[in-house]
Amino acid sequence: MKNTSGIYLLNKFNELLITHPTHTPDFHTWSIPKGESDEGDRDLLESAFREFYEETGLLLSENNSGENIFYLGCADYKSGKKRLQAFFIKDESIGREEVICSSTFTTATGIVTPENDEYKWLSITNRFERDYLIRLLHESQIGFIDNILRIISNK
């Protein structure tokens, strides 16, 4: 089983950034910026930072080390071929910045397409937005939201 790694980013407004993979339905397909390791990556966390930048254009603060990074656990993809290793970061230096995906794939018809076609910043402390977030997220990742809520309530 291949590992992928990704980051749940919480901004200064307690909003999580989620991404919509291009050419997928709207509900239970949203996720986080994530992907497989490249040859030069030292570990899963470095892969997660690189993928986050490639899929969002956001460079996370250098202050995100040690006590600011939390490992949330893993979730298997439905296909059974991949496993997401998820990390969580709260970065107070980030607001509601515009997100741009520089990571692409080529469709069967030869069209180069961004990996993600939409992004949302959704509050995890506002019950209505959190419920909407849970409707959007891939089912295997919903448990991570409870873990994040526990982390931020203990800070």
Image (cartoon, rainbow, N blue to C red):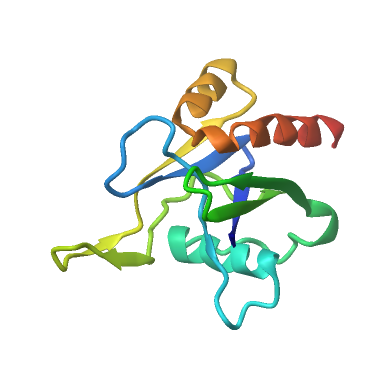
Q: Residue furthest left?
A: 109
Q: Please name the residue shown 66% across and 69% down the image.
A: 46
**Which residue is at the front of the view, 83 or 38?**
83
Which image quarter holds the N terminus? bottom right
Does residue 90 show up? no
Q: Position of residue 57 (x, y in %)?
A: 46, 62
Does residue 109 show up? yes
Q: Position of residue 102 (x, y in %)?
A: 37, 66
Q: Please name the residue shown 44% across and 39% down the image.
A: 30
| Vertical side of 68 occupied by 149: above or below | above
Q: How many marks?
A: 0
Q: Residue furthest top?
A: 128
Q: Please name the residue shown 63% across and 42% down the image.
A: 10
**Which residue is at the front of the view, 87 or 3?**
3
Q: Position of residue 37 (x, y in %)?
A: 57, 70
Instruction: Classify residue 69 by image quadrant.
Output: bottom right
Which image quarter holds the C terminus? top right
Q: Residue furthest bottom?
A: 40
Q: Position of residue 99 (x, y in %)?
A: 42, 53
Instruction: Classify residue 75 by image quadrant.
Output: top right
